Amino acid sequence: MGVTTAVAVETTVRDALAQGQAVYMAGVHGQPRERLEHLGLRGAMPEDRWVQDRESALKLALEELTPK
């Protein structure tokens, strides 16, 4: 992931979080994750929102939306 793309993702994520929206990072590993963490997203998002794949993100979102 290039720097420009990483900054665009970071800006989008921060804007969504500021509006109270849930954000999930699915399938982000290696250099892209390191770059996003370096931009400060590790501290901006709960660790459990960084998931292995899209299916895991969808399951987590569904669990969070389902009344208990």
Image: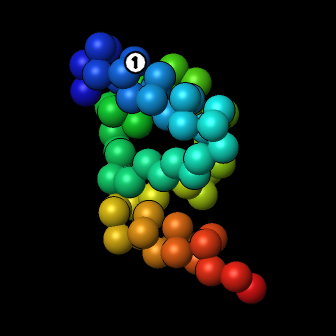
Q: For numbered disc 1, what is the local secondary structure?
A: helix
Residue at point 66%, 43% (across, down): 20
Q: Quadrant of residue 29?
A: top left
Q: Is residue 42 above or below residue 50?
A: above
Q: Residue furthest right?
A: 68
Q: Residue furthest bottom?
A: 68
Q: Quadrant of the C terminus?
A: bottom right
Residue at point 45%, 29% (across, down): 12
Q: Residue furthest left?
A: 2
Structure colour scheme: rainbow
Question: In the figure, is residue 56 to the left or right of 21?
Answer: left
Q: Quadrant of residue 19?
A: top right
Residue at point 40%, 36% (across, down): 33
Q: Quadrant of residue 34?
A: top left
Question: In the figure, is residue 42 to the left or right of 12?
Answer: right
Q: Quadrant of the N terminus?
A: top left
Foreground: 15 or 29? 15
Question: In the figure, is residue 56 to the left or right of 62?
Answer: left
Residue 15 rendering spot, x and y as whole percentages: 55, 29
Residue at point 34%, 62% (across, down): 53
> Would you name the residue on which mark 1 appears?
7
Q: Amino acid at mark 1?
A: Val
Q: Is residue 36 visible?
A: no
Q: Is residue 14 above or below residue 20?
A: above
Pointer 1: residues within 10 angstroms few (<14), some, or many (20+)? some
Q: Residue furthest front?
A: 19
